Amino acid sequence: MSDLAKYAKDNKVKFFLFNFTDLFGVQRAKLVPAEAVGKMQKAGAGFAGFATWLDQTPAHPDILVMPDPNSVIQLPWRPEVAWVAGEPWMNGEPLAQSPRVVLRKMAEKHAAKNMKLMAGVEPEFHLINADGTAVSDPRDTQEKPCYDQAAIMRRLDVIGEICSTMTQLGWGPYQNDHEDANGQFEINWNFNDALTTADQLAFFKFMVKSIAEKHGLRATFMPKPFINLTGNGCHVHLSVWDKSGKTNLFHDAKGELGLSPLAYNFLGGLMHHAAAMAAITNPTVNSYKRINAPRTISGATWSPSSITFGGNNRTHMVRIPDEGRAEYRLPDNAANPYLLLAAILAAGMHGVEEKMDPGKRLDIDMYAEGHTVKDARKLPLNLLDALRNFEADSYLRQALGKDAADGYLKLKHNEWNQYCRHLTQWERDTTLDC
């Protein structure tokens, strides 16, 4: 699809959401009527960058969001509206700090080397009541609620509509499940190239929240919305293929666990840059309540705390569940979909270029025996540590681009400083009488 005006006519679309995602992963949009979409597709929709999470001032000129017509999605629950991912332009060129621009250019760079990152994501979310105080199903109280058949059937109206919507969109959803926390769900769909998957993940979060609201509920992707329950991860399944998409370069039937040397070099890059990548894969104060959490009601957090990899073992940062792919278990759903996959691509390809060794595979339960591994590097304990690691990683910052990296760090440090100005009840409880 290249002509949005024709798309509107053919599909009876009345409005388009000209969308872009800012540095913090917040989706921004203008509602463009179909009568004006031809003009707006050529000229772009104007936004004030300073009014979003971009590193700009009120003195900057407008950014003009140019839609990518190949990304257009008609909303099945509101078919008179279509969503289209876009990229901000300024002064006649794509905005360098735009997360989608960063990922697209990086993907194009490696495609020229006949390598294409393919990714599938597992975004977990909670269905909660409208005021956000509790899970939406008062009967969802099991100590181990994962795969609870009764609980998922009680939410079939919501989960079923989301899944049916994804089927209608051609995404190929293949399983829905109740996850490890009360009120927590996950929907899996077919993997795709990195940019398509990032667009889908951005739209997925919008879709899930919209459909939940339609049913009088609220969906949250917050990494740790309830301190006693398992948090919301966004595991990423990774493989690198040739540009044609016919050959999986991660696969080697004779290799250890079915992975090629290139795959292990890619993992080496992930391991090498993991502590810095945490600033992007786990980008909020709350993120570190998930990856450094004590045991939850179910008995495990299902989140990594150290930079290790193993076979089909969910206690490590990277799991190798099958031949030809790896699962990166560190990210959470606060991550910007575009920066998340751009950071993975940059780190992994650095490993490929430098033939990095991921180190020894550990076939142990890291939760129970992790203390026996003396040289296992730990993940950051908080957002500030992660930001400092990112600042110190010159390769990763350069790969993402100075504008995006510097802007992200500036805005995230401001966020950390805002958090530090916040007085918690815990501080009053423990320090008032000191």
Image (cartoon, rainbow, N blue to C red):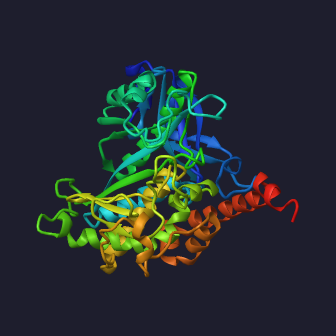
* Residue sitting at x 42%, y 41%: 179
The C terminus - image quarter: bottom right
Res 368 quadrant in image: bottom left
Q: Image quarter for residue 19?
A: top right
Q: Quadrant of residue 320?
A: bottom left
- Which residue is situated farthest in the left direction here? 254
In the rendered structure, the answer to whether residue 80 lies left or right of residue 431 reads left
Image coords of residue 324 (percent x, y): 21, 59
Q: How many marks?
A: 0
Drawn side of residue 406 relative to residue 417, left or right: left
The image shows residue 63 at horizontal and vertical percentages of 62, 49
Q: Nearer the viewer, residue 384 or 243?
A: 384
Q: 75 or 184, which is in the foreground?
A: 184
In the picture as drawn, the residue positioned furthest to the top comes out as: 12
- Quick check: 385 left or right of 355? right
Q: Is residue 101 visible?
A: no
Q: Position of residue 382 (x, y in %)?
A: 61, 65
Which residue appears at 28% of the width and 67% of the height?
113
Q: Is residue 288 above or below residue 41?
A: below
Q: Is residue 93 visible?
A: yes
Estimate the x, y position of residue 8 in percent, counting from the top left. Answer: 43, 24
Relative to residue 123, is residue 414 depicted above or below?
Answer: below
| Screen quadrant of the N terminus | top left
